Amino acid sequence: MNVTPRSRSAIVMFLLLISFVLMVQPLVAQDEVTEFVFAHSGPIRTMDAPVTWFGSTHWLTNGLYDCLIWRAADGNGYVGQAAERWENVDDVTWRFYLREGLTFQNGEVLDADAVKWNIDRVRTREDFLVYPQWQFIDEVTVIDPLTVEITTKTPYPYFEYDVSFNGCQILPPDYLTEVGEEEFARTPIGSGPYRLVEFTESDRYVFEAWDGYWAGPPAVDRVIYQVIPEQSAQVAALLAGQVDMIAAVPAPDRDLVSGTEGLSLLTETSNRMTSLYLRVETETGSVAATYPDFVPATLDNNVRLAISHAIDRDLLAEIQGSAHARLARVCDYYPEGSVSDLADPEFISSWYNPDLARQLLAEAGYADGTGPTVYLDAPNFQFGNEREVAEVLSVMLAEVGFTVELNTLDTSAYSEQIVSGGNNRDIMMTTLGCSPSLVPSFYRCAWVQSNYNVCVEEWDALGGEIAQTVDPTARLELWEQWWATYLDYAQTITLYEIDSVIGFNSAEFEWTPRKDGWFTFRDLRPAG
Amino acid sequence: MRGLIVRRLFHMVITLFFVSLVVFFMVRLRGDPISVMAPPTFSEEQIANLRAAWGFDRPLVEQYVLFITRAVTGDFGQSIQARRPAMELVLERLGNTWLLASAAALLGVVIALPLGIVSAVRRNSLLDLVSSAFASLGNAMPNFWLGLMLIIIFSVNLRILPAFGALEPAAIIMPAVTLAVGTAARLSRMTRSAILEVLNQDYIRTAYSKGVSQRVVLYQHALRNALIPIVTVFGLQLGWLLGGSVIVESVFSWPGLGRLMIESINVRDITVVQAGLLWFSLSFLLINFVIDLLYVYLDPRIHYR
């Protein structure tokens, strides 16, 4: 057969076209199971959730493992998971009654021994990042196969909060012992509503509904966590219909997402608070070695208060892109974060008082608008427009007389050099979670962090009292006093609470964001 | 030839040793990973305990000796974050990176060689002008931008290609094209100039004067003699593709070694960073090794002493 060059080219082109169609074809194939794909930036590095502190890992493993109890989605109390009910026997003893017939996904029995094994694991392994959080426990006692008692070292009001936080996941002891931690990280087994059926480390995790779950299988058959590092690529994947949800829609893309048929924006608090941390001593961190003769202006309480009153928090929250102004470092859906007027928008706005700031500076010895020089460190980008926030903040401080030396760094460098490196001179701006159980401990004399130590004897005693007052009413009264010192001492100046702006496929699914900012999908349902 | 191979392998071992030194000390320049790994709730004492538990409190030299003696057996230690062997994580991703780099290199060659040859043969023609414009554009376009544009066109608007991942064969098309454009641009210019240089040689004129057809002159005489500089640039490009895939892997969420490196650097998972960088270096050295052997094959006049 005589094949001309033109015919040969045509055949090659045809074969290429066929190959292309075959490659593309799976895209249009329809799957009958309901499948939900959540894209986020990661990282996710282990399935052995208790060893890590990364929130994204805990979101991911939430469907795989049950805890004893779990925080209600609306922030209002707790719900039982492995525990059917629980009671506070006395100030230091909590008793949990497990559900009957619980098993892990491999058939191993989940009983009181398994619970004790898991809690003992997280409170004794010093190489686990959750280890410090579990030190409030003195002893775990198995009463019978369905009853377990936990004794705390002292009366501990935040017991339920901490026992349902990072490290609470119940892992199968026999299986983990048999295969070892390394193999378990590859082939994890839990007792939650979803089984992990396939994963590529820190890339894609496929979960399938488990029929044997005590509450019945979840409403959506498959949940996939897909790591997409680039935000713009996340948005494109959402618009292309290849993912069903992204955790953070950048401000410039919000109109585009909300204007796309079938997609909507969900806004909810992210459980993250941005604050300024002011240096009140020069001993902690590497700052003394780096700037040996430097005397921070912020050692003066009046200077710190002047900074606090010079800031228009509402404006900063607007510049951040998705946030609301706050004065307290505990989120306002916890009762502790909204005592007195702390969460009242009018009260927050009234705190902005440039005249008072100038007056305080004058009292500190800086009259006639010639305030001190302060050094402000901030990340370029962490959760929004941090650099722009820091720039406007500098202008606000300059308006009342401060000279501001602003230093912005890339986030990872900022974290290493300033936050964790303890090399901050005057003021650092950073974003942290807002746990009511932890916040008072940061202001205890014995709690030396990498960057600063705060030690005010009366405040320290108040923090200690809060940590041991089980009665909620009495505890909130103590919190009221605690917050008064927080505002007056002004070592931490809270600016705003960050909101998550989520892109969601509302045409096919129904889901309500959790108040604690966690992305978990036990309650996800197909639309309608 | 055997002597050449032995010498080159010996050089590779020496180079890898120095790379290991640089990698080990560079990743520790900004402190140990515990400072980033520990949550902000950790006190100084707890951080010190954690540092001791991972062995980062030992003298650096002692840490290096431990690292290198284990590394020669393929043991790079446990990933601090994943709690799995660092080498295992790297090997899981290495294949994808090689696949992407190879596809991009192949695509680059398929585009560049004909384009370069035609540009050289038809110098100053419209085709040469178009080829030149493509080369300038291909060199100038940042690959993350090109990648995003491709996603918008083929995933968002046309909906015919997946925007991320490596779940199906079609997923490699956009990242490979993104990487190949720059390679094709550089390689086509190199091919053009190498062919032009050869075409001006006396033996080419002799071949023409003997009545040999242009096709035979071009493919049997000119191209073979022009291949040495082209192969050199191709080798460098392949190395660049391995390293340059870092950004493209992030844009397309391609589960390769580059993305793993970025994530590991961000969370200071230094065992993974060390293993990954050494594998990148070894890949680059292997490419150079193969290129060196190719020189001998392409031009028998070349001898290595």
Image (spheres, coloured by chain):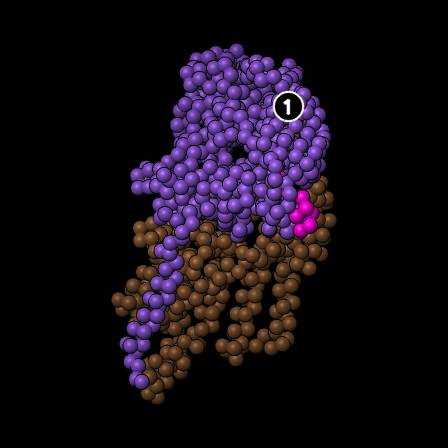
Residue A339 sits inside the magenta stretch: no
**Residue B217, placed above or below residue A376:** below
As drawn, the residue found furthest toward the bottom would be B210
Residue A109 in view here = yes
Give the quarter of the image for residue A245: top left
Image coords of residue A426 (percent x, y): 56, 26
Residue shown at the point (46%, 66%) measured from the top left: B234
Apparent colour of chain B: brown
Which quarter of the rendering shows the C terminus of chain A? Answer: top left
Asked whether, in this view, residue A480 is left or right of residue A314, the answer is: right
As drawn, the residue found furthest toward the front would be A100
Three-letter amino acid code of the residue under disc 1: Asn
Under tag 1, what secondary structure?
Answer: strand
Query: The magenta stretch spans which residues?
Result: A170-179
Give the chain letter at badge 1.
A
Q: Please give the letter of the chain rendered in purple.
A: A
Image coords of residue A483 (percent x, y): 55, 17
Residue shown at the point (45%, 42%) measured from the top left: A219
Residue A178 sits inside the magenta stretch: yes
Q: Main secondary structure of the magenta part?
A: helix
Q: Name the residue under label 1.
A: A88
**Residue B286, placed above or below residue A186:** below
Give the quarter of the image for residue A504: top left
